[in-house]
Image (tube, helix red, strand yellow):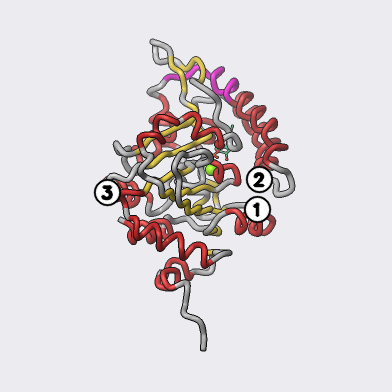
Amino acid sequence: RRPKKRTKIIEMMDELQKENVYIKDKERVEKLLCQLIQDGKSKLQIITDFDMTLSRFSINGKRCATCHNVLEDSTLVPESKKQILDELRDTYYPIEINAKMTIEEKIPFMMEWWTKAQSAIVACNFRREDLTRAVRESNAMLREGCDWQFHALHEHSVPMLIFSAGIGDILEEIIKQHSQMYANMRVVSNYMDFNHDGMLVGFKGDLVHTYNKNEGALRNSDYFTTLKERRNIILMGDSMGDLRMADGVPNMQQILKIGFLNDNIEERLEKYKEAYDIVLVSDSTMDVPNAILKKIL
Ligand code: TMP
Ligand code: MG
């Protein structure tokens, strides 16, 4: 006699049967889903990355803009600074996605990338109100299904922490233009500092780069303390650094990690399958997270 099926929920969900969905440990994911559904929305919180997780990686084969790219592609940044930012990306992005280096090895390079990019951006002297147009003229967009997800999480009062190494002002503008910023959303990111004339003069607070998101719980201790009854977490990310966004969150019981693998796929798939509970390869939608949310909400 065959043993009783232990992956019933997974098998019931069409979205999880697609070819681009990888689940290494089905029994673990089954148990997690079962617990998340049983505990319900009052025990749930979402922690998510922004660039290439909430935002789309590509459309018709063309890369979509990250927060930083919105500026680089705009008229706010003169050619000389564009060249600097391009060169920085060509140097450091391959390091960011390198499958052979450890996170610890990557950190000093990310610090360099962000620090140099921020000085180049600050030297452009643009104004706060210019950002709206820069975002409108960019091809930054949200994954299909984000709008539904944001609305549903708000309706059901499920808190969402957007933890981004991008630029806070720009990601909020992208969300506003393509969906809505809701009261249940909290953004932790690199925010621009504008002077009383509305001119950019620097960045506020501690730098967030791709690989220091493990300090999130520390930085956001008040936030997590108020949410301490919400002990189930759905984490979404596209980088190995995003896995650490919930490190140190107090009282956490269950965490379901959903990873979007957008680039350098062959080399990274094995690592992603080890690290993320569910891996979505070249997926431009929120279909899988939304299907799971529909069961919990
Ligand atoms: P995150 O998605 O982990 O929050 O990281 C933000 C992304 O921003 C990361 O993938 C690298 C990218 N980036 C640029 O595209 N240009 C830049 O100048 C910098 C500093 C980062
Ligand atoms: Mg990202």
Residue 170 in the magenta stretch? The answer is no
Q: What residue type is labelled 1?
A: Asn
State the CA–CA distance, disc 1 to disc 3: 36 Å
Q: How crowded is mark 1: few (under 14 residues within 10 Å), some or many (20 or more)?
A: few
State the CA–CA distance, disc 2 to disc 1: 7 Å
Mark 2 or mark 3, whichever is nearer to me: 3
Depth order, front residue of 236/137: 236
The number of numbered badges drawn on the structure is: 3
State the residue position of label 1. Answer: 264
Q: Which mark is residue 97?
A: 2
* Residue sitting at the far bottom: 1
Residue 283 place in picture, x, y as percent: 50, 58
* Residue sitting at the far left: 155
Depth order, front residue of 114/239: 239
State the residue position of label 3. Answer: 156
Q: Which of marks 2 and 3 is nearer the N terminus?
A: 2
Q: Do the residues labelled 2 and 1 touch (CB within 8 Å)?
A: yes
The answer to whether residue 248 is left or right of residue 101 is left
Q: What range of the chain is rendered magenta?
A: 118-127
